[in-house]
Image: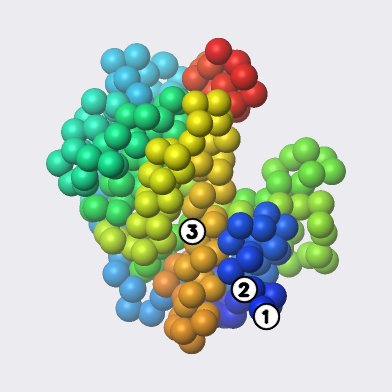
Amino acid sequence: MGSTQTTPQLPEQRPMAAVDDHRLRSQFMRALIASHPAPPPRGEPAPRVIVQFWDDRRTVPTDVEGCISGWATLDSQGYQHVLFDDESAADFIKEHLDDRHLRAFQACPHPAMRSDFFRYAFIWVNGGYYVDADDEYVGGSLAQTARAGGLQLRPLCYDIASDQMIDAVGAASAASDAQRVFYVDTTPLIAPAKHPIVGAALRNAMENILGASNENRDIQSLTGPGNLTASLVRHAIQLRQSSMPLDFSILEDWNSVAVSKWPLSYRSDKRNWRLWQRGGE
C-alpha cells in the first residue's frame, strides 16, 4: 500500500452531496481508491477473531460449509473462529445493543440483510474480521491486515458496459470513465471496536430498515455496500473538513487471501439475495 492521504475534489458549495448522489459518490470513491490510502499511524488493530453468519447453522449447505471450514484452520495463526446464526445473532444484539437494533435485525426480510446488519453490530461492539460464509479462504497471509490499524475495506468496481466486476485498483488509476461504479464491499469488514464508520453503517442500516416499506428490496442501499460506502464517504469528508488524517485503508490484494466462491447451490434459489431482490420467492 502507498502512503498518500489525499482525497478527491468535492463540490465546493455542497461537499456532502457526494454522500447521496450516486455519481458523485462513485467519483469520490474512484479518487480515494486511486490515492492508495495507507493504514493510519498507530491505529488500533482488529482483534484476531473471524466472524461469519448463516441464518440457520443446522442447514448450512455442504458447499458453503466447505468455505466456512477453511477459515477455522486459521486457529493455527492465533485466530478464533465463530459462526453465528439468526438465534445467536439476535442474542448478541439483545445483550449488547438496544431494542431498536434488535427490532431492526428481526425486521430484515432476507438472510443477507440480517447478515449485513449483524456484521456491523458485532464489529462495532467487539471488532474483528467479518467474512461472508461463501468467501473461500485460499491460503494467503493475514499478516498485513494484522499489522494495519483502523478500518480495512475491499474496493469494488462494476463496469456497466460489460456488466462485469473488474479490478477496482487498476480501474481507479485509469482514465475517468462514467460507465464504471466504484464502491466498497461489506466483506471482509476488518476493524477494531467502535470504529466510527462501522457505527455509522450500523445506525444508518437500522434507520433504513425501520423506515422501509415492506416492498423495498434494495438490499444494496438499505444494509449492503451502498450503505457502507455512503457511511465511509461522509466520514472521509468530515475528516477532510477537519484537516484530520484518514482512519481507514483500502485492501488492494484481498484476492490473495479469499475469493467469493461460484457456483454454490444456494445461489440458484431465494437464498440468493440477487434473485430475491428481483422478485423471486
| Front of the two marks 3 and 2 | 2
Q: Is residue 8 above or below residue 61?
A: below
Q: Residue at x 81, y 65 (%)?
A: 176
Instruction: Find out whether the residues at labels 1 and 2 contact each other: C-beta distance under 8 Å.
Output: yes
The residue identified by callout 2 is 15
| Measured Cα–Cα span from mark 3 to mark 2 | 14 Å
The residue identified by callout 3 is 231
Q: Residues within 10 Å of mark 2 (few under 14, many from 20)?
A: some
x and y percent of residue 96 in the render?
A: 18, 46
x and y percent of residue 251 in the render?
A: 52, 59
| Measured Cα–Cα span from mark 1 to mark 2 | 6 Å
Q: Nearer the viewer, residue 162 or 94?
A: 94
x and y percent of residue 84 in the render?
A: 27, 32
Q: Quadrant of the C terminus?
A: top right
Q: Residue at x 51, y 49 (%)?
A: 227
Q: How many marks?
A: 3
Q: Amino acid at mark 1?
A: Glu
The residue identified by callout 1 is 12
Q: Quadrant of residue 272?
A: top right
Q: Is residue 88 above or below residue 249?
A: above
Q: Residue at x 45, y 25 (%)?
A: 110
| Measured Cα–Cα span from mark 3 to mark 1 | 20 Å
Q: Which of the two labelled residues, at mark 3 and mark 1, occupies the earlier sequence position?
A: 1
x and y percent of residue 257 in the render?
A: 48, 48
